[in-house]
Amino acid sequence: MSLSLTNSEHWYTAYEAASAKQQYDMLLEAIAQPLSPELIEELDLGMILLVMRDELVNNNLLDQAIHFIQTLQEKQPDLYQQEFPFFDNLLVEYYLFHNQPEQARSALMRFMINPADDIDQTLAVLDYLKFYDATDLAVELSSAAYEPVRTSSKVLPGVEIEFSRVILNHQIQQAYRSLKNGEVIDWDAFLAEAVKYGYENTLKWVNEIHHHLISDIESNPEFLTQFKRDRDAVLRALSTEFCRSMLEQKQTSFVCSYALWQELVHFLESRDLPRKQLSQPDLYFTIHQSDLDRYVAQKIGGLLSTQQAVGFAILWGIPYIYDWLQSKQMIQDEVYKQAIAVATALKTQLVEGFKPLWKYNFIHRWLPPDSIPTTEFDAETKEFAASLDQVTPLSEESGHSMKKTLLNSLAPFVSPEMLQAFDEAEDEAIEAMPFEQDADGEDGEDAPTPTWVDPPIRSFKPEKPRKSALKLASELPTEGKKPANKSKKKKKR
């Protein structure tokens, strides 16, 4: 379908009436032409391109999506620069899945140069790097992003901690390997490097790390007393020893292993539990399905969610952590079995609900946990990879309107009455809707809180759990879309 862009109103009317397949061709033809900034703004072309990107990804037309993105890069570089977080993120995911680190690094360059342009997408990309155990890329992105994010007026204070953690855990792994090789470590230099990324300039916490790298924790009455007296210190010690174990037994880096531990502890600390329950290891590490369901749904769900990878990492990370806790006799068998059973039940639910499983195949880059048979692990690996083969051609049915696409995406999250009101409203009203309003009616989220497992650094308000249900996963749009009004609000981690 060939149509000149000299009249934007006529072009958009024709676009709304076209099929998805025709819309794809129209967009390729449009971006091949010189486009003025005024025309791009008038059409809201960035949003139109993003919706097509999602259409291609949701249909598993990945080769077509990559071609679409590369064409946009080549033909409209200025427009691409404005919208890069929503296109380069797919390239990073795609190249990590195919184990192509050099291509992934190329796709990361804009995030490294402009990490604060859309901090949600930058942090989502960082999650993928951590969980794929692409440590070199995660450290490179974190080193480049820390200072621009720390000083940006676009980002809430404290978000830079996410990058600090990556750099510090890489430092700790290097120190551990040096200690194993009998090398002498300059801990003053270690501290000086950490201070560059926001950590306190005192050797006390560095000495604590040194101790945890060379000493094992024993499950004995002293451990129980210490857990009751200073849970935070014990959790830090456990996190370091867990990372050591994962490096030795599963060849998984401290950056990846710590991310798994961190997400579990964030969940455990988010529960509203009596003080007594928080002070006893067995009670503290007991997982109830309803609690984990809600928490993972918070990560998975939402029209604008960028943390689906975190939801998968929590569930598939639990067997590694609880296998290790049981091997150290830190928890009783009943606690261990319940945690594995809960994680297994929710994993099944999530696999049944999500079509693009290939996006989360990082869970099979880790060696199998001890509690999962190799045959089961291998079968699941094939299932995730095969999800990329379930291709659906673009629809040839006419009338594939932008408004219809947006309303379909909203359907799982709003009442039928509200959906009807949006359907009857003018397009401007839909674009102005408060996409990110939380359960308390407040827009936006708070910064991450560096407690429980972090060395000393500034404190921030804890993140507020949202009310959700993991069972909605099967109905969720698989791509997090930016708000129609293009506002870029910071979401807490």
Image (spheres, grey):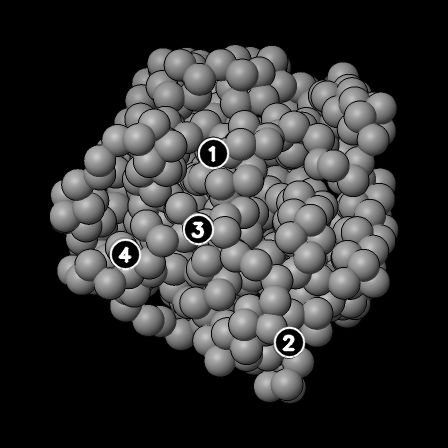
Callout 3 environment at 10 Å: few (<14), some (14 to 19), or many (20+)?
few
Q: Residue at x 50, y 43 (%)?
A: 243
Badge 4 element:
helix
Viewer-nearest of labels 1 and 2? 2
**CA–CA distance between discs 3 and 2?**
22 Å
> Upstream in the sequence, badge 4 or badge 3?
4
Q: Looking at the picture, which amino acid does disc 3 mark?
A: Ser
> Upstream in the sequence, badge 1 or badge 3?
3
Badge 3 element:
loop
Given residues 391 and 23, the one toward you in this image is: 391
> Upstream in the sequence, badge 4 or badge 1?
4
Q: Does residue 137 sit above or below 386 in this rendering? A: below
Q: Looking at the picture, which amino acid does disc 2 mark?
A: Gln
Residue 256 visible:
yes
- Indicate the quadrant where residue 140 lies: top left
> Upstream in the sequence, badge 3 or badge 2?
3
Badge 2 element:
loop
Horizontal and vertical percent position of residue 466: 62, 69
**CA–CA distance between discs 1 and 3?**
19 Å
Disc 3 target residue: 215
Q: Residue at x 70, y 73 (%)?
A: 283
Which mark identifies residue 207? 4
Disc 1 target residue: 253
Given residues 405 and 63, the one toward you in this image is: 63
Horizontal and vertical percent position of residue 413: 71, 61
Q: Is residue 326 left or right of residue 275?
A: right
